[in-house]
Image (tube, rainbow, N blue to C red):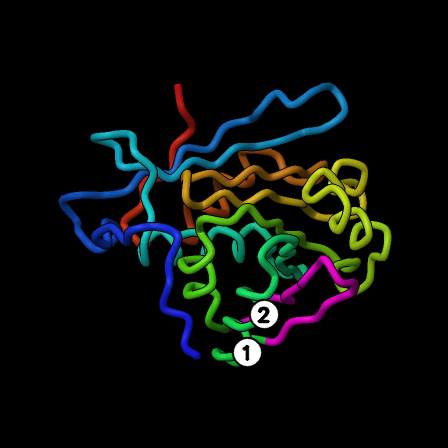
Amino acid sequence: MEDQTSNFIPDPDLNASEDHRSRMEIEPLDLGPDVRAVGFELIDPETREPITGPGAARTWEATLRALAGQEPWGLDFFAHLERVREFCRLRGIVFREPNARVLMIDAPAEGPLQELFERFAGETFGARAGALISNDPTVESGLAGRGVDAYHGAVPNYLFCAVCDFENGFLTVLSERLWASEMIRRTRAAVADLRVDVVRPA
């Protein structure tokens, strides 16, 4: 049966209007001495409320693709798997299940990820970029037991690991190879046609 439920009320597509642009704020985060993190926040600059809906989903997809660059990347789901599984099957999105509590999607070069991001914005899920995305039993087992906390010790093995909280307008990227300035550069180029201003807060 077609999945027509949603975890949030879609807002107008704020990215489509020249007069009402979105803002992506990107800045380093202090999560402790043993991890380097950068926070992304997608907001309405007038209200500072998070932006959701199709425009936000398109922006997040463009952002993750840009951050990954030429590296293979994918998504990690570890909650409400039956809903994710059904959604993917209905839309022909290829996925794999390394264990009973994790569902992984290797992001294609082109594909229907915008719909996925919009539908599951209310879930917290992960993303990784790097060669080990295709086979990392340690992370896959950790995701099943600890969710995105499994990324903590795995970051050096990847271009980045990330935590997606799109309903609240957040993306947290953990990386030892990408600095905040490089993330800003890549993101700004990727969303230039989406009417999103990418800034580093003062």
Label 2 crowd (10 A; few <14 / some 14-19 / many >=20): some
Instruction: Look at the picture and state if 166 lies above or below 133.
Output: above
The amino acid sitting under disc 1 is Arg
Of residues 41 and 143, the one nearer the viewer is 143
Of residues 52 and 33, the one nearer the viewer is 52
Q: Which mark is residue 29?
A: none
Q: Give the range drawn in magenta.
A: 94-110
Q: Check if mark 2's residue and mark 1's residue have beta carbons within 8 Å.
A: yes
**Residue at 48% across, 78% down:** 91
**Residue at 67% across, 63% down:** 104
The picture places residue 192, in percent across and down from the top left corner, at: 34, 51
The picture places residue 29, in percent across and down from the top left corner, at: 57, 24
Element type at mark 2: helix
Q: Tell me the quarter of the image containing the N terminus.
A: bottom left
User: Seen in the image, is 157 located left or right of residue 164?
Assistant: right
Q: In which quarter of the image is residue 53?
A: bottom left
Of residues 142 and 19, the one nearer the viewer is 142
Residue at label 2?
A: 85
Q: Tell me the quarter of the image containing the C terminus.
A: top left
Of residues 143 and 182, the one nearer the viewer is 143
**Residue at 47% across, 63% down:** 116
Asked if the magenta segment contains residue 126, the reply would be no
The picture places residue 131, in percent across and down from the top left corner, at: 77, 60
Give the CA distance from mark 2 to mark 1: 6 Å
User: Seen in the image, is 49 located left or right of residue 68?
Assistant: left
The amino acid sitting under disc 2 is Arg
Residue positioned most to the left: 19
Label 1 crowd (10 A; few <14 / some 14-19 / many >=20): few
Residue at label 1?
A: 89
